[in-house]
Amino acid sequence: MILYFSATGNTRFIAKELASRLDDECLDLLKRIREKDYSPITSDKPFVVCVPVYVCEIPPFIIDLIRNTPFEGNKNIYFVFTSGGYSGICSTMAKRLARKKGLNYMGSADFKMPRNYIANSTYPELSEEEIRHRIDVSYKHIPEIARLIKDEQKLVKLSKHVWLFEILITVPFTPVWTRIKQGVKRFSVSDKCIGCRKCANLCPLKVIRADEKGRPVWDARMCAHCMSCIQNCPVEAIEYGDITPPKKRYTFERYGITKTPKP
């Protein structure tokens, strides 16, 4: 069973490509996350959890879902991470989570995908060439991962080693970053909004509600900054302060491989 959450399509792409090669089911976790649905998930094949990396960690809402959802059937679990280039302490978190659930941690794999976090001016925008290069390299990496999972082999050589200093830096840093940088006050919507409610329907934490005209209202103090609302808006009506107006929007579907045959 391939389980995934994806805000802008990167992780969905990897998950569906793996599912195709493994002839396995692919389950989008968005609805379960939004509804806090902790009903059991059953699979005869290994579980493969595909998730994005947020602030060097597995997103808290995904940790919550996995921790509280019974995984029945196969006892092996793999993790696949998509990031802009650094998966932080995710492999350590995944290993600890698997053990607490009584599952056999089979390792993890990293995919360096196009960066989709645009609510910060620290990172430069990627060129069209770099975006397509990252997608192409990741695509070529998929068959090897699929083969190892199909044979239920451990991803020992592929799993990122997490050094102690990474843990010591990340653990105290992430809560501070979240508290200071992931507020919602700087989100705004322009007159271009068509009231489609797509942003509200895609928000994993239900931070966004639609008003009587269908326009988004950020109804909480903090959010995950998954960028789903900004990046998926069909008319680019959502902005984050003065940071996002000059930036191009990104979803995998705008650049990615739309049809790929099985090997």
Image (cartoon, helix red, strand yellow):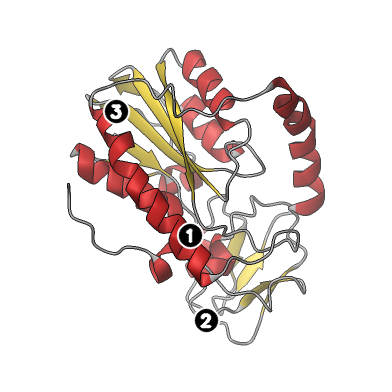
Mark 2 crowdedness (10 Å alpha carbons): few <14, some 14-19, many ≥20: few
Residue hosting label 3: 148
In front of the other: 165 or 171:
165
Left or right: where does residue 134 sit relative to residue 147? right
Q: CA distance from mark 3 to mark 1?
A: 27 Å
Q: Are marks 2 and 3 in contact (CB under 8 Å)?
A: no
Kind of residue sitting beneath label 2:
Val
249 or 72, which lies in front?
249
Give the side of residue 33 with respect to residue 162, left or right: left
Task: Identify the residue under disc 2.
Answer: 235
Q: Residue at x 56, y 80 (%)?
A: 213
Mark 2 vs mark 3, CA separation in Å: 41 Å
Query: Along the polypeptide, which appears first: circle 2 or circle 3?
Result: 3
Q: Which residue is mark 1?
A: 8
Q: Secondary structure at mark 1?
A: loop
Task: Choose mark 1 or mark 2, whichever is in front.
Answer: 1
Q: Quadrant of the N terminus?
A: top left
Give residue 258's quadrant in the image: bottom left
Q: Which mark is first along the chain, 2 or 1? A: 1
Badge 2 element: loop
Distance in Å between CA atoms under marks 1 and 2: 15 Å
